[in-house]
Image (cartoon, rainbow, N blue to C red):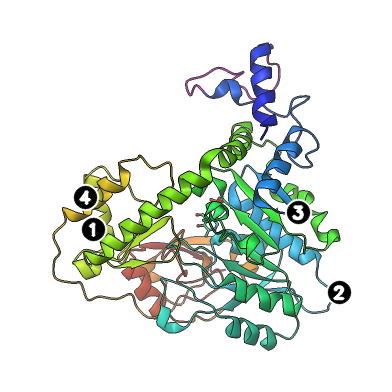
Amino acid sequence: MNTPIWDFVTRYCEGDPLRLHMPGHKGRGPLGAEARDITEVPGADVLYPAAGIIRESEENAAALFGTARTLYSAEGSSLCIRAMLYLALLGRAPSARRPVVLAARNAHRAFLTGAALLDLDVAWLWPDPSSGYLSCPVDAGALDRALTALPEPPVAVYLTSPDYLGNLADLPALSAVCRRRGVLLLVDNAHGAYLKFLPKSLHPMDLGADLCCDSAHKTLPVLTGGAYLHIAESVPAHIARQAEPALALFASTSPSYLILQSLDLANRTLVEGFRERLADFAGQTAELKDRLARQGWQLSGAEPMKLTLLPKSRGYTGAELETLLRARGISCEYADPDCTVCMLTPDVDPAGLDRLEAALADLPPKAPIGTRPPPLTRPEQALSVRAALLSPQEDCAAGDSVGRILAMPTVSCPPAVPILAAGERIDKAAAALFDYYGVTRCLVTAEQ
Ligand SMILES: Cc1ncc(COP(=O)(O)O)c(C=O)c1O
């Protein structure tokens, strides 16, 4: 597989031109990466719309993922999520009603900011209360009933799979409902770019998604910020045609060529042995998970490359376990009172899994911790997502926040299902959750 962006920049650097264009570092600096950090000079193409080397590289990615079209983002899945929502809105039949997107409650805040910017209302697909805040399982029957309950079809169904803790949605069943109902299915697959390359693909584009974003940087060997927006054949042509304008609507006009080169090189890496390395590493990880389970560690989530430990059964909170692992030179992705999340890829140091296993074996089991997260509650929607997110905001001590309206969700707390979305009133139950998750301050809408 060729690497047209990387090759262009190599030739450009070899030509050693006098750089009288951006960026200001002129190709020199302390990072060592400055020489390759170019801008949209002649021959380098532009990102939106791409017609030269970037387009060629995107076509390589589309061939790898088996999509009708794959577009690059140098600004993460966050950018792609906004573009997906805009595209869904474009496909809407004329109506006097306000547009609604039907979304599983475990959505990332980029979804909320996108809905706010596009003036979309959100109808939530709630999980069963027994699943709490640690996962958001939605079954096909519940989706079907939620669609029936809406006064008119939503602009799209929006699912997050995998989520931060490694839970996978039943996409084949859920996409079948969307297809039958003629509703677009958008999937936030920020955590699952690699799913395409497992021996049996679990990638949303192979399981029925119409539009899907992947944060290549989260699970593939790609620099932070590199992401894909995938478009399926099933997307009507008049919507698919607007994908680049949709990205351009929200994107910077100065895309990072370091990130674009990284996405470009990843195409070659992915065809040159990645599948084999992933299959081998997934096997080792599955064996590790089995051994840990036999030793009494409680694990969560079916995603193969995520190791989510629920260590209270061994007498440790998630945060304590994270600290103990850090003291042993192991740096995890996330921890909260209930869980510790490790993100794995075949690029983990070959001895890495052994180190992790040895570090866990070094921690003696203690009396189980019985505390559980407070049960899932449904807060009152006091303002629309847009009204809340776009209103003046105030920083407020969590302890003083009861009765106020949340303006901006806290970053990732808890990571699967947010305590509150923008526009929802903070009640006593939410305040108890803030306390449980150690949230001490929150952003609320300003009182006039
Ligand atoms: C579920 C989910 N969706 C979307 C995003 C945003 O992705 P990015 O950081 O690539 O913009 C994240 C980031 O952590 C995420 O966890």
Q: Earlier in the sequence, mark 1 or mark 4?
A: 1
Q: Earlier in the sequence, mark 4 or mark 3?
A: 3
The secondary structure type at the circle numbered 4 is helix
Q: Is residue 49 magenta?
A: no
The secondary structure type at the circle numbered 3 is loop
Image quarter in which the C terminus is found:
bottom right
Rendering coords of residue 79 (x, y %): 64, 51
Q: Main SS type for the magenta part?
A: loop
How many residues crowd mark 1 within 10 Å: few (<14), some (14–19), many (20+)?
some
Residue type indicated by callout 1: Glu
Picture residue at 60% right of the left edge, 24% below the top: 36
Q: Is residue 26 magenta?
A: yes
Q: Judge whether residue 391 can be spotted in this image.
A: no
How many residues crowd mark 3 within 10 Å: few (<14), some (14–19), many (20+)?
some
Q: Judge whether residue 293 can be spotted in this image.
A: yes
Q: Earlier in the sequence, mark 2 or mark 3?
A: 3
How many residues crowd mark 4 within 10 Å: few (<14), some (14–19), many (20+)?
some
Circles 3 and 1, Cβ within 8 Å, touching? The answer is: no
Circles 1 and 2, Cβ within 8 Å, touching? The answer is: no
Q: Which label is found at residue 320?
A: 1
Rendering coords of residue 232 (x, y %): 73, 59
293, above or below 143, in the image? above
Which residue lies under the disc numbered 4?
Answer: 359
Residue type indicated by callout 3: Ala
Residue type indicated by callout 4: Ala
Q: Which label is found at residue 94?
A: 2
Which is in the foreground here, disc 3 or disc 1? 3
For the residues marked 3 and 1, what is the alpha-carbon distance in whole angstroms? 46 Å
